[in-house]
Image (cartoon, rainbow, N blue to C red):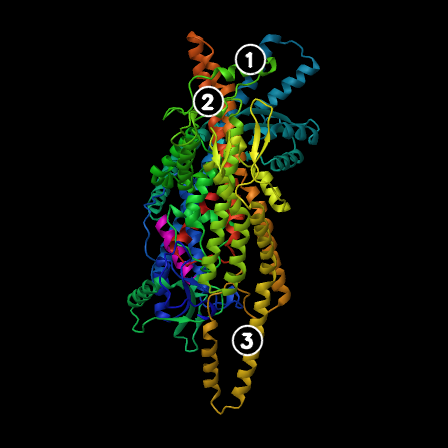
Amino acid sequence: MGDYVTPGEEPPQPGIYRSEQMCLAQLYLQSDASYQCVAELGELGLVQFRDLNPDVSSFQRKYVNEVRRCDEMERKLRYLEREIKKDQIPMLDTGENPDAPLPREMIDLEATFEKLENELREVNKNEETLKKNFSELTELKHILRKTQTFFEEHEDMIASSAESSGIGEVLSADEEELSGRFSDAMSPLKLQLRFVAGVIQRERLPAFERLLWRACRGNVFLRTSEIDDVLNDTVTGDPVNKCVFIIFFQGDHLKTKVKKICEGFRATLYPCPDTPQERREMSIGVMTRIEDLKTVLGQTQDHRHRVLVAASKNVRMWLTKVRKIKSIYHTLNLFNIDVTQKCLIAEVWCPIAELDRIKMALKRGTDESGSQVPSILNRMETNEAPPTYNKTNKFTKGFQNIVDAYGIATYREINPAPYTMISFPFLFAVMFGDMGHGAIMLLAALFFILKEKQLEAARIKDEIFQTFFGGRYVIFLMGAFSIYTGFMYNDVFSKSINTFGSSWQNTIPESVIDYYLDDEKRSESQLILPPETAFDGNPYPIGVDPVWNLAEGNKLSFLNSMKMKMSVLFGIAQMTFGVLLSYQNFIYFKSDLDIKYMFIPQMIFLSSIFIYLCIQILSKWLFFGAVGGTVLGYKYPGSNCAPSLLIGLINMFMMKSRNAGFVDDSGETYPQCYLSTWYPGQATIEIILVVLALVQVPIMLFAKPYFLYRRDKQQSRYSTLTAESNQHQSVRADINQDDAEVVHAPEQTPKPSGHGHGHGDGPLEMGDVMVYQAIHTIEFVLGCVSHTASYLRLWALSLAHAQLSDVLWTMVFRNAFVLDGYTGAIATYILFFIFGSLSVFILVLMEGLSAFLHALRLHWVEFQSKFYGGLGYEFAPFSFEKILAEEREAEENL
């Protein structure tokens, strides 16, 4: 496989520690069997096809017509799906995964979909026509009813006007005009007045009335009445409020103008008879037709419903089949066609460990197609870097996603995911150490885990929920580790648990009390328990002694010192482990230069300064107790006489000489003294360590580029001599070529570019090599300092979380215990609800997110930068399961 062929003698390694070994293979498939073979490979989901026709347009490929047919079938199914959802009919989704249909079955599917679509469109068209007719008849019914009411009102008004005025009474001019109008309305044929009746939307009526009055200059008479029933729009189905109107006018010129205005406002005009008898007869006919239309419309809707219910049982399965067919033909378009037109050639990336399963899938596809010619899989050699394939399950997937978010691993380099499974939740818990808050997180993750099948079936679209649900196993471990670190901190909702009994005396010595009462300023200060007088000498069995929760005077100073030193220890330990993992990468890729001139100098540099500092921290914890003792023959009264780590580190870099013994400042009640040196000759040893660390910098900077330059020169000279000797030989050219390949075969070892694994292929560019080496050297040297300081975030966030929890307890929930009686009981319930809500939303969610992001940064920058290149690309196999999942997700997001 060229530069990326994994040696056959290499012992198999679990895929979780490195990506799977991949190979490039050629597939030779007979044309008749190619479809079924690709279908079997799609069900298997273990091969990634390469496009062998990158310069050919999508419209010029062999199977473009089949892809278009699949697109058309999918469009028809989408139409069916929309109609089913419109009627709110549940679609049956059994989760069944049918096999990809054979090519000859496409015709049956197309005929089925065509028949369903035509039938449904015809039914919809008939239903739309019936609804339109029904709506028009309903409007006509209201017009006949309302106009009859108009005429009856006019008749009553005229009759009442005549009775009130008396027989033979002379009318005024205005009354005559009014009487004339009503008489005209009552009998339009007599005075040659005409009228039109129709329906208009209620919101358009005011503008319609104003325009009608102005355009006709007041020579029309308009009456309107609202329709009480809510009518539905025939196109959209939305409810519409409409009004009935009747317009009286005289002359043909007004008739034309009135009709144009009605058309402009989309008012519908209906014929209305002149006489009451005709209107009554027409109304009876309309009611009869409406009843008939209701019957026909109901039958049409029942037929449509039956068609959709029958289709709803198979739509999901049909969609799955069509998508599988479409993906198969898309994949076949990536193949090359043999000159004989009888064989298809494909190139695939596949895991070496799965070659037997792939061959069995090809054999099944060939047998099912009935072909007599077997399919062939031939491994190829290539200089191209293979894709990275890490096997995951539902537990490891979350941690692998955390690593892949930084960058896909370079092929076959160390995979940080298995180490992240432990270190990530642990570092999170160091910042989030609280048994109560960790238990809340653990229970939430446990709920997601126990109900995962029901929650997956529910397909909840909320993005935040999907984030928490997808990382349920990560959250579970973070909660479990938080309970552990909370137990070590002896912290549960900012309170301590006295599990093993305190190692401090129950009574405060009188000398300490007298010391505080001696001075008025001291008596007002917070009480401090000096370890020299209050500690009984027996350490607490595990974790932090609960008495520290009561010592307000020196609680923070003690916890700060402990957590700060602990953060440095954890940080340097993880960085050292990262450098050790880089050694495993160098060993695997057979990079001797990286081992000699990168790994060894890095370990020496790290050990000379930072591991030496860790040894001093551990020595200070182990050899200096609270009640004093003897170190190197010197007696000291307590732990305050231990050497200062910060001053010692400054003196080390300044190469300052120090006198052995104690520096004592006597004269106080409690002498302030400290041990100036840890051991005899400390200054000399530290000078040697600093010089040794500084010497590693030019080694890391220049040694590897120099030897790469020498190796390149030797290879160039050897190639020149080989070419000259071949010119004088009388052997055939093809044999010479084979010999040259054999000579260069040992160099074909996996050397992915980046992160010190090699300088890549092609001629050596010394400028690029020097820049690359300088960047990595500066990054490592400065990173050791900055990354160590970066790990102090473990101390800072742990302190912030504990103090915020303490403030929440003190300022909220503790106030409930001040009150007595019923008031205290009610206050307890109310304040507990507030305390619980703030704890969940602030301390668990917000602080948890903050700790998560900081732990993420520590792994991406401080840990993975020591050994992880992340320059690969992900293995994307042809998988029906993945394709269907992506389509389903796209549907849910619409």
User: Horizontal and vertical percent for residue 523?
Assistant: 57, 14
Q: How busy is the neighbourhood of tag 3: few (under 14 within 10 Å), some, or many (20 plus)?
A: few
Q: Note whether 374 is above or below 806 in the view shown.
A: below
Cα distance between the residues tagged 3 and 1: 85 Å
Left or right of 211, for residue 442: left
Q: Which residue is mark 3?
A: 715
Question: Which label's residue is closer to the chain start, 2 or 1?
Answer: 1
Cα distance between the residues tagged 2 and 1: 17 Å
Of the pair 18 and 311, the residue shown nearer to us: 18
Tag 3 secondary structure: helix
Residue 414 falls in image quadrant: bottom left
Q: Which residue is mark 1?
A: 517
Mostly what secondary structure, the magenta segment?
A: helix
Q: Nearer the viewer, mark 2 or mark 3?
A: 2
Label tally: 3
Q: Note whether 606 is above or below 839 in the view shown.
A: below
